[in-house]
Image: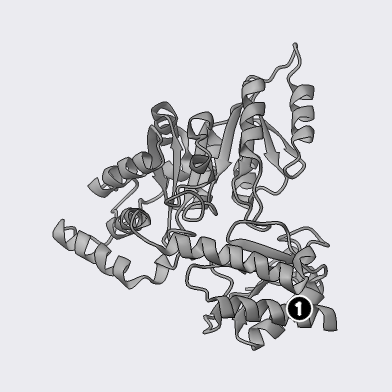
């Protein structure tokens, strides 16, 4: 049975723009594309520790058996959520099946009619999708532009304003640019206007802080933020996410977040993986290796004279802006032929003219590998 003509046309337009997405096959190239920043996803010691934990606690169950509100709230959830809350110095935590589920669940349920959401224009699709499902009004502000944000709040918050609660939404590390906002400034604005600050820390967990706690805790601002979203598919190398906040917020989410309520829970093995990965943050030296590699990569960009190509970043994400889908796909293909697994990020994932190569750094990347990939990039860019 053929798909409808409208769908065929959309696929045709995507192909014409050289922007058609396809599922890639695994490769053996040097990893500059995965989010496994600390190497936890392939860490055999963590794998063995998870198995040992399950066996020692006589947990031999393959699935959760149902939603958490019916039959799937196994004991490991309580253990893991208490550990996560303590680790992040939060009153409470609630595990969701993925970062997408967490953001959709939060933003579709928490902001109410007559509330307003002000979100950074580069916020992740999962945040934007959740906002679209909300009954609140929403407006984007220019990326990391606090004057624009304040102007929009001032325009909204008038004496006769119908809006009840203002939510300011951002990410502590932006997934496509790798840059970070000034969280202190955002805290000051939220306090000035009595707004609630919500921060997605997906790409900060395992990267920032003494033990990978994230940007917010590294600046001791955890008590100034209404909610934090921690995603486990990046620095922790596993799956799932948690929303951090006070006990009342967590109780509300259990009752009203549809992406939490109407889905089967994670298996005991999945939750054990989250717990053991968190415990490894306290004893692993991978975080220090990652920080050293980030510093080295930035130094090499400067030495080769290609720093202007890149968005400023001190995170594990480094994006070289190379406008045009054809151009960036061509350079990515040549890097891959040389054995470097670097991916092109195309429009419409990023705006037209902002197409880029996205380099993800890891604790296990060698200095020689970083030097070689940047040298090759330099050659390709300036020989085209």
Disc tally is: 1
Q: Position of residue 172 (x, y in %)?
A: 59, 46
Image spot of residue 25 (x, y percent): 55, 81
Q: Is residue 215 left or right of residue 140?
A: left
Q: Classify residue 375 by image quadrant.
A: bottom right
Residue that sits furthest to the bottom in the current view: 337
Q: Nearer the viewer, residue 318 or 199?
A: 318
Residue beneath label 1, please?
A: 378
Quarter of the figure with the C terminus: bottom right
| Viewer-side residue, 344 vs 206 | 206
Q: Residue at x 42, y 29 (%)?
A: 246
Q: Is residue 47 left or right of residue 241?
A: left
Of residues 17 and 167, the one nearer the viewer is: 167
Whether residue 39 can be seen here: yes
| 265 in relation to 157, above or below | below
Residue 359: % across, % down: 63, 69
Mark 1 surroundings: few (<14), some (14-19) or many (≥20) residues within 10 A: some
| Extreme-top residue of the structure | 159
**Residue 345: in sight, yes or no?**
no
The secondary element bearing badge 1 is classed as: helix
Name above or below for residue 331 compared with residue 223. Answer: below
- Quadrant of residue 336 within the rendered picture: bottom right
Identify the residue at image location x=70%, y=17%.
162
Image quadrant occupied by the N terminus: bottom right
57 relative position to 199: left or right = left
Question: 274 above or below 318?
Answer: above
Image colouring: one colour
Residue 239: name its quadrant: bottom left
The structure residue drawn at horizontal position 27% and vertical position 63%, both measured from the top left corner, is 50
Q: Position of residue 379 (x, y in %)?
A: 77, 82
């Amino acid at each position: 049975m053929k798909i409808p003509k409208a769908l065929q046309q959309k696929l045709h337009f995507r192909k014409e723009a050289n922007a058609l997405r396809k599922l890639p096959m695994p490769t053996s190239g040097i990893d500059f594309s995965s989010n496994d920043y600390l190497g936890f996803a392939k860490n055999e010691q963590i794998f063995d520790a998870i198995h040992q934990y399950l066996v020692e606690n006589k947990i031999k169950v393959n699935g959760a058996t149902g939603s958490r509100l019916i039959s799937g709230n196994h004991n490991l959830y309580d253990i893991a959520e208490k550990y996560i809350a303590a680790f992040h110095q939060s009153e409470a935590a609630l595990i969701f099946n993925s970062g997408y589920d967490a953001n959709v669940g939060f933003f579709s349920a928490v902001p109410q009619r007559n509330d307003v959401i002000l979100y950074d224009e580069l916020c992740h699709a999962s945040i934007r999708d959740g906002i679209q499902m909300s009954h609140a009004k929403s407006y984007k502000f220019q990326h990391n532009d606090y004057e624009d944000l304040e102007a929009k709040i001032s325009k909204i918050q008038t004496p006769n304003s119908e809006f009840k609660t203002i939510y300011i939404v951002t990410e502590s590390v932006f997934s496509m640019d790798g840059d970070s906002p000034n969280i202190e400034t955002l805290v000051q604005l939220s306090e000035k206007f009595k707004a609630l600050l919500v921060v997605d820390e997906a790409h900060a967990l395992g990267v920032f802080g003494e033990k990978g706690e994230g940007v917010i805790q590294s600046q001791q601002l955890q008590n100034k933020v209404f909610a934090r979203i921690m995603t486990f598919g990046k620095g922790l190398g596993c799956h799932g996410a948690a929303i951090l906040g006070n006990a009342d917020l967590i109780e509300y989410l259990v009752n009203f977040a549809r992406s939490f309520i109407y889905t089967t829970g994670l298996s005991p093995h999945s939750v054990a993986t989250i717990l053991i990965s968190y415990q490894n943050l306290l004893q692993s030296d991978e975080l220090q290796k990652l920080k050293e590699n980030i510093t080295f990569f930035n130094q090499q960009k400067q030495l080769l004279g290609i720093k202007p190509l890149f968005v400023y970043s001190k995170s594990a994400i480094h994006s070289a802006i190379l406008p045009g889908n054809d151009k960036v796909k061509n350079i990515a293909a040549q890097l891959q032929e040389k054995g470097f697994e670097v991916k092109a990020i195309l429009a419409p994932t990023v705006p037209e003219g902002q197409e880029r190569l996205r380099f993800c750094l890891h604790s296990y990347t060698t200095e020689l590998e970083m030097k070689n990939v940047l040298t090759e990039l330099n050659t390709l860019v300036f020989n085209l």
